[in-house]
Image (cartoon, rainbow, N blue to C red):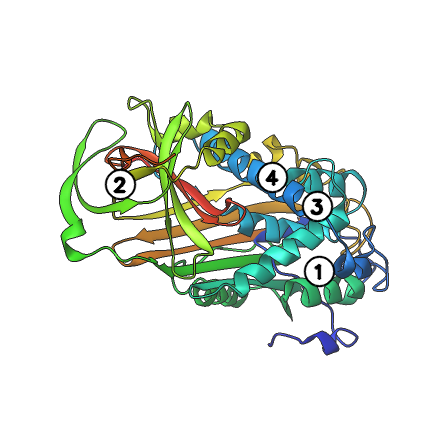
Amino acid sequence: MKFYSRRDIKAVTGILAASILLGGCVTTTPGSQELKSDPKAKTEIDLSKVSTTEYDKDLFDAEYRRYSIELLSQTIKNFGSEENVMVSPASVMMALDMVAAGCKGETLKQLTDLFAEGQGPLTQQAYASNMMDKINNAAEVEFSCANAVWNNANLLGDGINTEYVGYIQDTFLAEYRVTNFNNKTVDEINNWVDKHTDHMIEKVVDDLDPDTVMVLVNAIAFDGKWEEQYEEDCVREGEFISYDGTVQDATFLHDDLDYYFESDKATGFIKNYEGGEYAFLAILPKDDSISANEFMKNFTPEDYESFIDSKTGKYEVVTMMPEFTSDFGIRMNSTLIDLGAEDVFSPSVADLSGIAGVPGDIYVSRVIHKTHIEVDAKGTRAAAVTAVMAVKNAAFDEGPEIRYVECDRPFAYAIVDVETMAPVFIGTVNAI
């Protein structure tokens, strides 16, 4: 078994990469279990035009920020726990945009609106592709975005739309594998995830349903050193008050920074990683009686815009945050449904016929999302994987004023693109 290059698609069937499992009701013929379709079928999106499609960058950056805040908020609401939570809006978007490339009708519209409401699918595909390129070309931090797809030869075989396969390979650099699904396939998927998350996430799937026709996986890994390192005397022991009032011993990182944020709901700071393209953004609720999860449940996209727009350099900012490590995993179906992407999960109405078959043949059975983050005096390591499965069916004379942002209690954070303030990862710390 091997990954197939772009030039092989005429000889073998294709597979795409995302963190999604596709299933469906396969159309069969006597003596065959393969899903049948015209391999030369056209998708509703003219995929040949994506690479030359222009879009309003400011508008799409704003839409992505909206989606990021809504994704974390809805995840926390559905998760229903005060544990530390982190999601990667970028990973989820990459995975689902690869699915969207093979969708039609209302299914396509719902997935596009999830990320960029009211915009066209061509422009959304172009935006996602450009974000992936930016991640993979980041300077002075180790940042990677990878995709892979496994095609169940027993069910899908060569019935896949070759135009779709070529698009996923060319645009999202997706590795593509055709194999008979079994326990070995589970190991292959998890080994790929382990490698492409820099060994931060060991596995994403435990098993594969017999009706799974495709598995699409996106993996993002980040390893950034602080632009200005924490000196030894800036790393001190202290106490962190967790969400339930428990006092925990913690190692705190102290610094004086240049930029301060303050809205009616939160204060915060930003600390750059090497290269200055990406940074850690801390968001400390003004209400010290609530957990970070409770805070983020009600933190709207408008709240986030108000917060990032408050950035000022007129204060000396004395900061403190704990070192922490956090792992999080969730089946994200209900979150995405609650955000409006319903049809892709419904066997009766899902239209993924741009991938294979006819409307209703394939639908998304599971979207699995896992994340990991480590923050310490040296920098930050973070990773995310999304799997999608488809189945059948001012100046002061006496010096600047001082502002304090001391994260010794629950807070939220994001690893952001400094230019756009768009979160690649976003999460909460409720306990150490």
Label 2 vs 3, first from the N-terminus: 3
Q: Secondary structure at mark 4?
A: helix
Q: Residue at x 17, y 51 (%)?
A: 235
Task: Kindly identify the amino acid type of the residue bearing the numbered disc 4.
Answer: Ala
Given residues 128 and 197, the one toward you in this image is: 128
Residue 121 vs 261, above or below: the answer is below
How far from the left and from the top, in percent, is residue 243? 28, 29
The CA span between labels 1 and 3 is: 41 Å
Q: Which residue is mark 4?
A: 62
Which amino acid, mark 2? Thr
What's the CA distance linking mark 4 and mark 2? 28 Å
Q: Secondary structure at mark 1?
A: loop
For label 3, count other residues whose C-alpha is less than 10 Å away and answer few (under 14), some (14-19) or many (20+): few
Mark before the other along the chain sequence, 1 or 3: 3
| Mark 4 crowd level (few <14, some 14–19, many ≥20, 10 Å Cα) | some
**Residue of label 2:** 319
Mark toward the start of the polypeptide (1 vs 2): 1
Residue at 53 percent across and 37 percent down: it is: 71
Q: Earlier in the sequence, mark 4 or mark 3?
A: 3
Marks 1/4: CA distance?
40 Å
Q: Are marks 4 and 3 in contact (CB under 8 Å)?
A: no
